[in-house]
Image: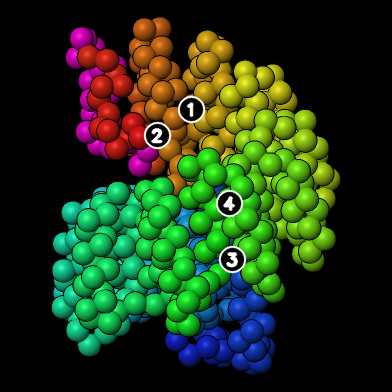
Amino acid sequence: MMLIRSRYKLVKNFGISVSGSLAICMHSTTSVLESLENRVLKVWDPMIPVVPVLDQWVEEGREVTEFQFRDLVRRLSQFRRFKQALQVMEWMCNERNHDLSPGGIAIQIGLISKVHGLEQADRYFRSIPDAKIGFKTYAALLRCYVEHKSLEKAEAVMKKIKEFHDLDITECYNLMLKLYGQMGKYEKLDRLVREMKEKDISNARTYMFQLNAYVAAADIEGMEKLLMQMEADPVATVYWHTYSSAANAYRKVHNIEKAMAMLKKSEHLAKGKTMRDAYESILTMYAHIGNKDEVYRLWNVLKSLKNSRNSSYLFMLSSLVKLGDIEGAEKILEEWESQYRNFDSRIPTIMISAYCKLGQVDKAEACLKRHLDGGKPLDERSWDRLACGYRADNDMEKAVQAIKKAVSANLAGTKPDLFTLVPCVKYLKEKGDLDLALEILKSCIEQDHISVTSYDGLVSYVHNETPHTEPLDLFSLDEEN
């Protein structure tokens, strides 16, 4: 993996600059941290590198501690700006006098997994010196395997984690419960629960992972028994999302009346700082059960809360699109456009995607153009959705240009739609524009959008070395999903 180079050095004694400037010494920890944090957080577009901001900071004679950069990484991760968070970590790693602690290495493992995928995270883990491999690094690797639903690897690393008898590994057990539940491995989940009871290993999250497993399996009887146990157990804290999860189970079996009752209980438990997160989630649940009146009711509650944020608009727009209320969604988008403080490309992308799915490509183009003309570049998700719309409209020339922009960058957690990418490559091959086909594939492999195996196969396909092969057959099942 290429690491970002910087010629500047970090110092661990905060407040002492290279020049010994008294002005730097007089900065408080909070004021300097906020100043750097504000500079970096202002780079709202996750596709824009933050390294120049860091370089400029030290050019001004400012130097900060590892703790402050770790806090910056944490803040970026909170906003799901994982690529920028990884840039900060890599910038730190390349300072000659800085060495990551095991905790820092654990953070880096997680970020690499989110930005570049599991294969790169595995490769990075193998490069770690044995002396720095311990519980934190194994736990970080386990979390990566769970996020990517890599069952065998997760079970293997869990065996190593169980060797740390003197440490609290409850959360690692909880991660395995989560994985077993997500993958429908209920027998293994039950065995693990019994093992945890024998070892007296559990916490409030253990109950939640068990509950989520019942919800995933739509096991209403099991869920109701566990819910009664949680309500009676003083150790088990029942949160707003406990009842929200139960509502989701009832929704799956089309018991709307009980789902509504659970959502009302969930609302009543939403208090203080959790209120906005709770209402955003519950609003989405009301959309899932098709209750538009409740969606708008909660939206009005959300708007009455102080410090409105982009996430509320994201949840509301997604909910209205799900309900098919495109006219209402357009009004919400217009409201956001008139008052947002920080641009969030995900919000117009929701409408662009909705328009394309409805075959209204002209509206999708207009939405995209409006933001581009306003100096707000959209990320590859918007271009990918537009490419899908063009492909469905059989306008392959425009689809190719859109997919070219979609694959030119790597936004954490996103990949181009294969059922659009492949027809574009096929179209270019049949047209005879091999250079552009190869250029698009090169971007795909450089940005980890496709595997090396798929890339090699598609390059062979473009060169007509596998004339009887359908290009989509060259992808693994994981990529197709």
Q: What is the spatial separation of the Cα atoms under label 3 and label 1, in whole angstroms?
A: 43 Å
Name the kind of residue labelled 3 in the image: Trp
Asked if disc 2 and disc 1 are in contact, CB closer than 8 Å, the reply is yes
Marker disc for residue 258: 4
Q: What is the spatial separation of the Cα atoms under label 4 and label 3, in whole angstroms?
A: 16 Å
Name the kind of residue labelled 1 in the image: Lys
Asked if disc 1 and disc 4 are in contact, CB closer than 8 Å, the reply is no
Q: Callout 4: 10 Å neighbours few (<14), some, many (20+)?
A: some
Q: Callout 1: 10 Å neighbours few (<14), some, many (20+)?
A: many
Of callouts 2 and 1, which one flags the residue occurring earlier in the amino acid sequence?
Answer: 1
Residue at x 78% of width, y 58% of height: 301
Q: What is the spatial separation of the Cα atoms under label 2 and label 3, in whole angstroms?
A: 43 Å
Q: Which residue is mark 1?
A: 404
Q: Position of residue 373 (x, y in %)?
A: 74, 34
The residue stretch that appears in magenta? 448-468
Residue at disc 1, secondary structure: helix
Of callouts 1 and 4, which one flags the residue occurring earlier in the amino acid sequence?
Answer: 4
Of callouts 4 and 2, which one flags the residue occurring earlier in the amino acid sequence?
Answer: 4
- Identify whether 324 is placed above or below 84: above
Q: Looking at the image, what colour scheme do you see?
A: rainbow
Marker disc for residue 240: 3
Residue at x 27% of width, y 29% of height: 475
